[in-house]
Image (cartoon, rainbow, N blue to C red):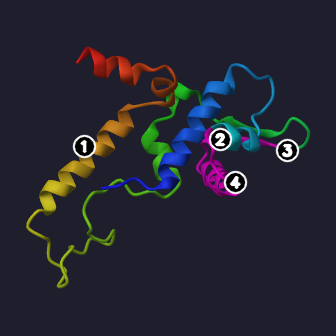
């Protein structure tokens, strides 16, 4: 399973935005995020349109305009961000319509393995918040283990 650039870039940009929330009295411009994260501005605009529609960010127009988190970093899970940009978190090759992964609509021999892996990824990303990411708590938890 591979997370595409949509999901990865959305998380990177949202983490950047979350990190800047406390610093600035004004909204954060996408051009600034694009420069810091080395992501195409036009690509970020597409991602943030989806994030805004899903209620994860708020936009402000005009001078000093840009984006803010709609909720705190501690209330925003990584899974929500990935889902907001239409990134599936499943590891099977089965269609979303419930058909199996084989030509005749049957499940492959390893279907349950990949389905379980996808569920583990979903559970993990649902348990991690933007606050965990920007606070460095993931590295600390990994080093303690």
- Give the label on residue 61, or none: 3
For the residues labelled 1 and 3, the Cα–Cα distance comes to: 39 Å
What SS does tag 1 mark?
Answer: helix
Q: Which residue is mark 4?
A: 45
Q: Which residue is mark 2?
A: 57
Residue 85: x %, y % from top left:
53, 54
For the residues labelled 2 and 3, the Cα–Cα distance comes to: 13 Å
The residue carrying pointer 2 sits among few (fewer than 14), some (14 to 19) or many (20 or more) residues within 10 Å by Cα, namely some
126 inside magenta stretch: no
Q: Earlier in the sequence, mark 1 or mark 4?
A: 4
Residue 141: x %, y % from top left:
32, 19
The residue carrying pointer 1 sits among few (fewer than 14), some (14 to 19) or many (20 or more) residues within 10 Å by Cα, namely some
Q: Earlier in the sequence, mark 3 or mark 4?
A: 4
Q: Which residue is mark 1?
A: 120
What SS does tag 3 mark?
Answer: loop
The residue carrying pointer 3 sits among few (fewer than 14), some (14 to 19) or many (20 or more) residues within 10 Å by Cα, namely few
Q: Is residue 1 above or below residue 99?
A: above
Q: Is residue 47 left or right of residue 76?
A: right
For the residues labelled 3 and 4, the Cα–Cα distance comes to: 14 Å
Q: Which residues are magenta?
A: 37-60
């Amino acid at each position: 399973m591979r997370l595409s650039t949509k999901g990865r870039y959305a998380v990177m940009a949202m983490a950047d935005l979350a990190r800047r929330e406390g610093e600035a009295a004004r909204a954060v411009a996408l051009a600034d995020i694009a420069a810091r994260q080395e992501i195409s501005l036009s690509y970020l605009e597409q991602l943030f349109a989806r994030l805004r529609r899903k209620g994860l960010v708020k936009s402000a127009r005009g001078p000093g305009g840009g984006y803010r988190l709609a909720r705190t970093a501690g209330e925003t899970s990584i899974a929500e961000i990935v889902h907001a940009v239409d990134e599936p978190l499943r590891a099977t090759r089965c269609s979303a319509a419930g058909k199996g992964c084989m030509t005749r609509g049957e499940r492959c021999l390893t279907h349950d393995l990949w389905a379980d892996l996808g569920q583990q990824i979903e559970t993990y990303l649902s348990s991690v918040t933007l606050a965990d990411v920007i606070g460095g708590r993931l590295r600390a938890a990994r080093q303690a283990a």
